Image (spheres, grey):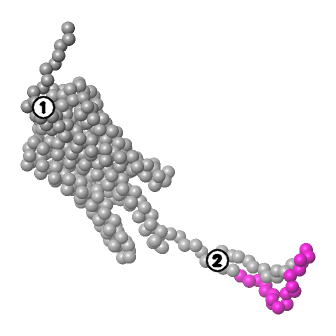
C-alpha cells in the first residue's frame, strides 16, 4: 500500500531554509579559512626543503617547522572534511574519533612554532642564564597545557551529548577560554621580551654599517612572530569577554587564523633569518678569509724586435719568456 507524503506548508518553507542556512554558515566560514591556509601550507612545506641544506635539515628548528606545517596541513584537510560532512549530511551520525583528533590538532597546532622561538633564544644565551630565562615561559606552558587538556575533555563530553560541533561552541565554559588566551598572551609577551634582549645584545657588538640592517631584521622578525599573534590574541580575548560565548564561531575563526599565521610567519622568519645571516656574512669582509695576492716573477725576457718571424715548421720555438707563478 503506497503512502503519499504531505507537502510542507508554504509558510514553513522559508523558515526551514533560513534555519538550515544559519546552521551551515559556520561550516562555510571554516571551509573558507581552512582551504586558504591549507593551500598555503603545501608550497610552504616544499619551500622548506627546497631552500634548506642537508646541515639545516638536521637542526631542531627545521624539524619543528616541518612538524608544524605538517600538522597544519592535516588539520586543514580534516577540518574541511568535517565541515563538508556537516553540510551534506547534517542528520547523519558523525564520527566522534575524527572530531577528537581535530580538536587535539587545533589545540596543539601552534606549539611547534612557539618551540622554535624558544630554541632561537636558548641557542644564543649563556647556558648559566638559561634556567632563569626559560623558567617562566616553561611554567606558563605547563599551565596552558593543563587548560588545553581540560578544554579537550569538556569538548568531548559536550560533543557526545549534542552531536553537533557548532552547538557545542557556545556551551563551552568561558573561563577556560579566557584562561587559555590570557596565559598564551603572557607567554608570548615574555618570549618576545627575551628575544629583544638577545637581539639588542647582538646589536651592541656589531659594526655601525650593519646596525640598520640588524634593526630591520629584529623589527620584521618580532612583528611577524610576536606582534601580529599578540594582536589576534587581544582581539580573541576582547571578543570572548564582550560576547561571552555568543560569538563562538567568530572566536573559533580568529583562533584558527591566528594559529595558521603563527606557523607561516615562524617558517618565513626562520628561512629569512638564515638567508640574511648568510648575506651579512658575505658582505662582512672580516668574517670571510680573503685570497692571498698572486705574485708573478719574470725570470727572463727577450726583446721582441730580435725574435724571428713565426715558422710553420715543427721544432721551432717562438716563445722565449719564462714565467713563474708564486702564491
Q: Quadrant of residue 20?
A: top left
Callout 2 secondary element: loop
- Quadrant in the picture for the C terminus: bottom right
Q: Is residue 20 magenta?
A: no
Which one is earlier in the sequence, the residue at label 1 or at label 2?
A: 1
**Label 2 crowd (10 A; few <14 / some 14-19 / many >=20):** few
Residue at coordinates 66% horizontally, 79% vertically from top-left?
A: 295
Q: Nearer the viewer, residue 258 or 30?
A: 30
Residue shown at 45% from the left, 50% from the top: 49
- Where is residue 249? Give x, y as percent: 17, 42
Principal SS element in the magenta part?
loop
Give the quarter of the image for residue 312.
bottom right
Q: Secondary structure at mark 1?
A: helix
Q: Quadrant of residue 104?
A: top left
In the rendering, which numbered label is found on residue 294?
Answer: 2
State which region is magenta. 297-316
51 left or right, relative to 1:
right
Neighbor class of circle 1 (other Cα within 10 Å; few <14, some 14-19, many 20+) is few
Q: Which mark is residue 13?
A: 1
* Residue at 18 percent of width and 28 percent of height: 163
Q: Residue furthest top?
A: 1
Q: Is residue 12 above or below residue 310?
A: above
User: Does residue 209 appear in this view?
Assistant: yes
Q: Can you say whether 36 is above or below 194 in the image?
A: above
Given contact means CB atoms under 8 Å apart, are the residues at marks 1 and 2 in contact?
Answer: no
Residue 176, percent across and down? 14, 41
Q: Does the magenta-highlighted stretch encompass residue 305?
A: yes
Rendered position, 93 above or below 202: above
User: Can you say which quadrant of the picture contains the N terminus?
Assistant: top left
Q: Is residue 100 left or right of residue 304?
A: left
Amino acid at each position: 500500500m503506497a503512502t503519499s507524503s504531505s507537502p510542507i506548508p508554504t509558510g514553513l518553507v522559508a523558515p526551514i531554509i533560513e534555519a538550515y542556512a544559519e546552521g551551515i554558515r559556520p561550516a562555510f566560514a571554516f571551509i573558507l579559512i581552512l582551504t586558504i591556509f591549507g593551500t598555503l601550507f603545501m608550497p610552504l612545506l616544499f619551500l622548506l626543503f627546497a631552500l634548506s641544506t642537508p646541515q639545516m635539515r638536521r637542526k631542531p628548528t627545521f624539524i619543528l617547522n616541518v612538524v608544524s606545517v605538517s600538522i597544519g596541513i592535516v588539520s586543514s584537510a580534516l577540518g574541511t572534511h568535517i565541515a563538508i560532512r556537516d553540510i551534506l549530511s547534517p542528520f547523519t551520525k558523525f564520527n566522534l574519533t575524527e572530531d577528537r583528533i581535530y580538536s587535539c590538532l587545533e589545540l596543539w597546532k601552534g606549539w611547534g612554532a612557539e618551540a622554535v622561538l624558544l630554541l632561537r633564544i636558548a641557542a644564543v644565551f649563556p647556558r648559566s642564564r638559561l634556567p632563569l630565562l626559560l623558567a617562566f615561559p616553561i611554567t606558563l606552558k605547563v599551565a596552558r597545557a593543563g587548560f588545553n587538556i581540560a578544554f579537550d575533555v569538556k569538548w568531548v563530553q559536550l560533543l557526545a551529548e549534542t552531536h553537533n560541533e557548532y552547538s557545542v561552541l557556545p556551551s563551552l565554559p568561558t573561563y577556560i577560554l579566557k584562561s587559555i588566551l590570557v596565559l598564551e598572551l603572557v607567554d608570548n609577551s615574555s618570549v618576545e621580551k627575551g628575544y629583544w634582549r638577545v637581539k639588542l645584545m647582538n646589536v651592541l657588538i656589531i659594526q655601525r654599517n650593519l646596525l640598520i640592517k640588524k634593526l630591520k631584521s629584529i623589527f620584521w622578525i618580532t612583528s611577524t612572530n610576536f606582534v601580529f599573534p599578540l594582536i589576534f590574541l587581544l582581539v580573541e580575548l576582547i571578543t570572548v569577554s564582550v560576547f561571552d560565548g555568543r560569538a563562538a564561531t567568530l572566536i573559533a575563526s580568529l583562533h584558527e587564523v591566528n594559529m595558521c599565521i603563527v606557523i607561516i610567519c615562524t617558517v618565513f622568519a626562520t628561512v629569512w633569518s638564515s638567508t640574511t645571516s648568510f648575506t651579512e656574512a658575505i658582505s662582512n669582509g672580516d668574517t670571510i678569509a680573503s685570497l692571498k695576492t698572486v705574485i708573478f716573477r719574470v725570470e727572463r725576457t727577450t726583446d721582441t724586435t730580435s725574435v724571428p718571424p713565426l715558422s710553420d715548421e715543427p721544432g721551432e720555438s717562438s716563445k722565449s719568456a719564462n714565467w713563474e707563478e708564486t702564491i
